[in-house]
Image (cartoon, rainbow, N blue to C red):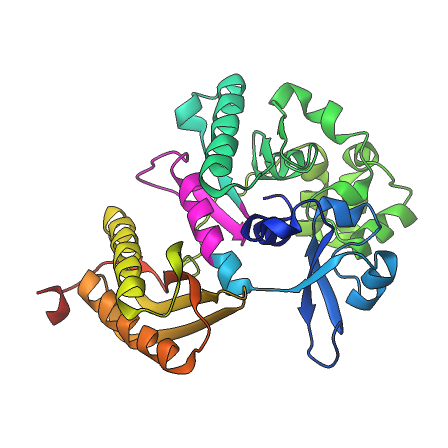
Amino acid sequence: MDSFYAAIEERENSELQGKAIVVCMLSGRSELSGAVSTCNYTARESGIKAGMPCSKAKKLNPEAVFLPVRKDFYTSVSDRVMEILRSYADARETGEAFEQISIDEAFLEITEKTGGDFNLAFEIGNQIKNEVKDKEKLTCSVGVGPNKLIAKMASSVQKPDGITVISPDKLERFLWPLKVSKLWGIGNVTAGKLQEMGIVTIKDLAEHDVIDLISTFGKTRGVWLKQAASGIDNSPLKEREGSEQIGRIATLPEDTLDVNLISQLLDRLAGDVISKLDSRELSFKTVTITVINSKFRMYTKSRTLNHPAYSKETLLEVTREILNEFLSESRTEFRRVGIRVGELQKRIGQKSLFDY
């Protein structure tokens, strides 16, 4: 995804359109004590980048809009984006065809859908971009390659809103002119050691004696460096057990604290979530409710169940409990509400009483 957090904030508040937006992890000690989490491309033109102190970013662009990270809200958007991506991955009985590696990034295996045709892969990449833009009003950049390493590196070539295809016959032309620090998986320490060895480009690394690499970095790392520089990566896709979440969030017909209006929307969102769980035969153990009020402030509350569940009745029961807590505490009308379930796992064993 392209400047994911900042892009979501722009989408949510039309007054932010065209402005430099900086999303910060704030410490709370003072107004801008903390570090930049991400920023949009307008802010990057001022030299602002992730990891920079927010106070420094403010000096670089005093006109920029500084916002606190709303991780739960971004996660709920991510859940929907990931469902779109997953729908394009191969349907495989054995082995994984989808791997989410962060809140805004994932790998998809599409070998079976394309029959290994990289032109068809380009078309699928464009379909993904169009569906994400149509349904979420956000842009993403796509990289297509013969393995994870190349796909990951290709995805950064034409940011934002781009697509880059690197077929096997283009590997050396793509990789070798790049500085060795650009190879995915190489950090600053390794890049520094390689430069001390006279290895500046990825081509230098590919042509370097593997025995020398092994003596410096150890057998596993040395062999990997040699192979990666030639575009070789055999690592499989692997879904992280228990880390995935499924969620839905939507805007209320009007800003309100009316329990009936809010409950009607939550009922619909719960139905969507359960439908997704049913299609993949999953159960859940955690339920999170997200509320964004008319002042664009976000609040979340979560519950963890004693056992995995997958019925709509159970989900709604927990949802109503949390909603009542929110309503008893809030004086500001709600603008958006969302439901998210986590600690997902395959349904096994006997049904619970709730399922009857």
Specify whether residue 247 is in view.
Answer: no
Residue furthest to the left in view is: 356
Q: In the rendered image, which quarter is residue 167 located in?
A: top right
Q: How many marks?
A: 0
Locate the C terminus and report the quarter of the image it occupies: bottom left
Considering only vertical position in the picture, is 283 above or below 155? below
Q: In the rendered image, which quarter is residue 9 located in?
A: bottom right
**Residue 202 spot, x, y in % from top left:** 79, 36
Considering only vertical position in the picture, is 350 above or below 109? below
Q: In the rendered image, which quarter is residue 18 located in?
A: top right
Q: Residue at x 48, y 66 (%)?
A: 293
Q: From the viewer's side, name the closer residue of 56 and 341.
A: 56
User: Over which residues does the magenta segment extend?
Assistant: 76-105
Q: From the viewer's side, name the closer residue of 11 and 159.
A: 11
Q: Residue at x 84, y 36 (%)?
A: 201
Q: From the viewer's side, name the closer residue of 239 and 55.
A: 55
Q: From the viewer's side, name the closer residue of 211 and 263.
A: 263
Horizontally, residue 270 falls left or right of residue 232, namely: left
Residue 278 colored magenta?
Answer: no
Residue 87 colored magenta?
Answer: yes
**Residue 352 spot, x, y in % from top left:** 14, 69
**Residue 43 spot, x, y in % from top left:** 77, 50
Q: Residue at x 84, y 49 (%)?
A: 46
Horizontally, residue 352 falls left or right of residue 271, namely: left
Specify whether residue 42 is in view.
Answer: yes
**Residue 44 spot, x, y in % from top left:** 78, 48
Locate the N terminus and report the quarter of the image it occupies: top right
Horizontally, residue 212 falls left or right of residue 167, namely: right
